[in-house]
Image (tube, rainbow, N blue to C red):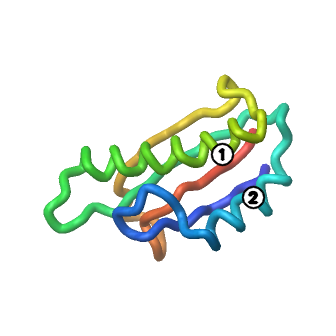
Amino acid sequence: KNQIIINFAQESEEPSIEELKLFYKNMTNFNKKDRITIIGYAKKGINDSSSNARRLSLKRALFLRSLFLEENYEITDIHIKALGFNSNIEGNKDIVVITND
């Protein structure tokens, strides 16, 4: 099982250039026949609601899914989960975790 963790700046919908390079470098570990799960997380800002964090985590996951689709992965093989804020994550809570089954 392969895993990529992409870090995001707080409140950013897209990763930095460095994180995008990391994404493309690690994308080669995934096979087009794989089922891929993209799980988005977002830190809750001081005045944010949980639904704001979930919405941002969804936008991040969808952005990364679009990069897989540009590389001709099947949309039906990519599962998106927008989990919003998770206090159990160590370190940066603004991440997207990509795994394959």
Left or right? Give the position of 9 relative to 36.
left
- Residue ranking furthest to the bottom: 91
Name the residue located 24 percent from the left edge and 65 percent from the top edge.
45
Left or right? Give the position of 29 relative to 80.
right
Q: Amino acid at mark 2?
A: Tyr
Estimate the x, y position of residue 16 in percent, counting from the top left: 55, 69
- Label 1 vs 2, first from the N-terminus: 2
Q: Residues within 10 Å of mark 2 (few under 14, many from 20)?
A: few
Estimate the x, y position of residue 76 in percent, counting from the top left: 66, 23
Name the residue located 85 percent from the left edge and 41 percent from the top edge.
31
Disc sitting over residue 24 in the figure? 2
- Residue ranking furthest to the left: 47
Residue closer to the observer: 24 or 86: 24
Disc sitting over residue 9 in the figure? none
Quarter containing the C terminus: top right
Estimate the x, y position of residue 74 in percent, counting from the top left: 73, 28
Name the residue located 69 percent from the left edge and 36 percent from the top edge.
69
The number of numbered badges drawn on the structure is 2
**Are the residues at dot 1 and dot 2 in contact (C-beta closer than 8 Å)?**
yes
Disc sitting over residue 67 in the figure? 1
Describe the element under mark 1 as helix, strand or loop. helix
Quarter of the image for residue 3 reads bottom right
Q: Amino acid at mark 1?
A: Leu
Name the residue located 28 percent from the left edge and 61 percent from the top edge.
44
Residue 68, relative to residue 19: is it above or below? above
Q: Residues within 10 Å of mark 1 (few under 14, many from 20)?
A: some
Describe the element under mark 2 as helix, strand or loop. helix
Residue 23, relative to residue 51: is it above or below? below
The residues tagged by marks 1 and 2 sit, at their Cα atoms, a distance apart of 9 Å
Residue closer to the observer: 56 or 89: 56
